[in-house]
Image (tube, helix red, strand yellow):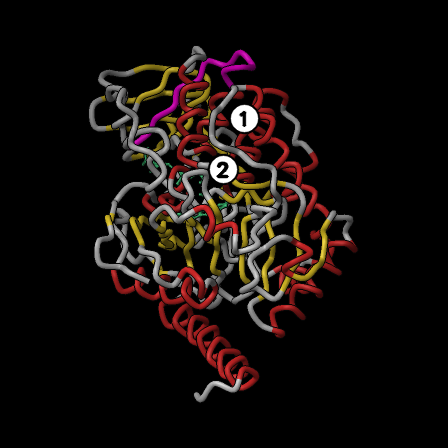
Amino acid sequence: MKTGNVEYTAFSGWVDPPSDVLPSLTGDLTCEVAVVGGGIGGMSTALRLAERGQDVVLLEAEFCGHGASSRNAGQLAGAPGGDLQLLDLLYRKKMPGMIRLAEHAAYHVEDLIKKHDIDCDYEQTGNVFAAVSRGQLGRVRRVAKLLRRVGADVELGTSEELGIPRGFLGGMREKIGGIMNPGRFTLGLRRALLRTPARVFEQTKVTDVAHDRGQVVLSTPWGEVRADKVVLATNAYAGEWDITPPRLSVPIWVIEVETEPIDPARLAALGWTSRSGLVTQHNIMENYRLTPRGTIVFGVRRLERGRTYPLPQKAPDPALVEELAGAFATRFPALSDVAVDRAWGGWIAITSSWLPIAGQLDDSTYYSIACNGHGLAQAPYVGSLIADLIVDGERHEDLEELWREEPEFPRPMMMSPLGLRTVWLVDRFNDFVNGSRRNARRGVAP
Ligand SMILES: Cc1cc2nc3c(=O)[nH]c(=O)nc-3n(C[C@H](O)[C@H](O)[C@H](O)COP(=O)(O)OP(=O)(O)OC[C@H]3O[C@@H](n4cnc5c(N)ncnc54)[C@H](O)[C@@H]3O)c2cc1C
């Protein structure tokens, strides 16, 4: 695969930043609810609050959609993130609720797209847990069994049966969800928010959160917001503040890469008739998906831990793009001559439990980390549930599932740079063994 002329961008390959970035807050103001962070989580919270008649202010450091929301792979998942077998082992009682939450979250985003008429190329294709080895096929079958046990609607099959490329051995389709252009979804949500009476300030970084006389006081460089309640929706960036509970989440950098446009006949020859997004069953997944512009977007495979705040705004490391291109050529041998056109990355938040979480730091401060790489569905849903909680004073049963009474979190496992490197090495060792077996079957010398 050719990686000579890659456009490395520090934003997203899906869309350009909005041309009408709003001015910073200058001066002081008061409101009922302030939302900090204008990703799909924060914007959905503010949108719902405004729709429900609250006087809401949203403060965003750059522009709404600047974070992971515009940068992700656009695979709207109907199942939770993480290793589902491990989650089932650790939190068996919680699994039915987590699956229900994930499914409702995907439906919620589909409803948002319809309600606000967001043109984001959404295709209701489901997503496939795709196996690249017999070991991964076994894993997929076990995951399918546990998902069926808790009532999820999944379909097991060979690559032909699932309509996925023949380079994969088969897999399991989670039927709910699909693929979209996440940049256009995010900017569509921004437009919907800007049509409400919510007051939105971009280029307004919140530098401190304090309490004074029963109100929350948010400091920004040129003004102060006093609110009765505040929702912190800053995702991976949350660790910047002292008020963030220790170990709430770990910021992790992941990347996506897009091919050049591929000849339609060559794409058709792949047998990818379902157009479902794919995630492999490595410990650190690879994801692959088609786009309406005749390209394939693919990524992740390596997780890089952020070490210092503020998190840097950066473009992908060319060495990782090379590595992902190598993986692409293995999964799609017929396209190994295709070039990479662009690459970008973003920060996600991984919780120590690998479960989405939400809670209150005190009577007036709400937070949520509904991500673990699956926030495209879950962040907007949890955001709107928090908005409803603020208005109604009651927690929806789905919010109850991830609610933390005490903001205390254990140290995350395997999330140190060494731990992440070890997990990556295990994946590469398994790939090597599987590659050797495949070659032996084909009679190719090692
Ligand atoms: C490369 C990549 C691929 C992914 N693929 C998928 C996928 O296919 N499917 C899926 O479900 N999920 C995926 N995700 C995860 C998904 O994008 C996130 O879970 C989701 O976007 C989180 O939304 P959010 O609103 O919580 O956070 P973000 O979009 O990160 O928004 C947080 C916002 O807060 C702002 N902010 C931070 N600090 C401050 C401050 N002090 N003051 C004011 N504003 C502040 C930031 O500028 C940012 O705009 C992926 C993520 C990445 C990076």
Q: Is residue 279 magenta?
A: no
Left or right: residue 314 versus residue 427 is left
Residue 302 at x, y = what percent?
A: 39, 63
Q: Is residue 151 above or below residue 61?
A: below
Residue type at the position of mark 1: Ile
Q: Nearer the viewer, residue 12 or 267?
A: 267
Badge 2 is on which residue?
A: 180
Residue 410 at x, y = what percent?
A: 51, 59
Q: Nearer the viewer, residue 173 or 81?
A: 173
Quarter containing the N terminus: bottom left
* Region rendered in magenta: 49-61
What's the distance in space between the residues labelled 2 and 1, CA to CA? 10 Å
Q: Is residue 55 magenta?
A: yes
Residue occupying image coordinates x 50% and y 82%: 439
Secondary structure state at the residue bearing disc 2: loop
Which residue of the protein is positioned furthest toward the front in this rendering?
A: 265
Q: Is residue 7 above or below residue 185?
A: below
Q: Residues within 10 Å of mark 1 (few under 14, many from 20)?
A: some
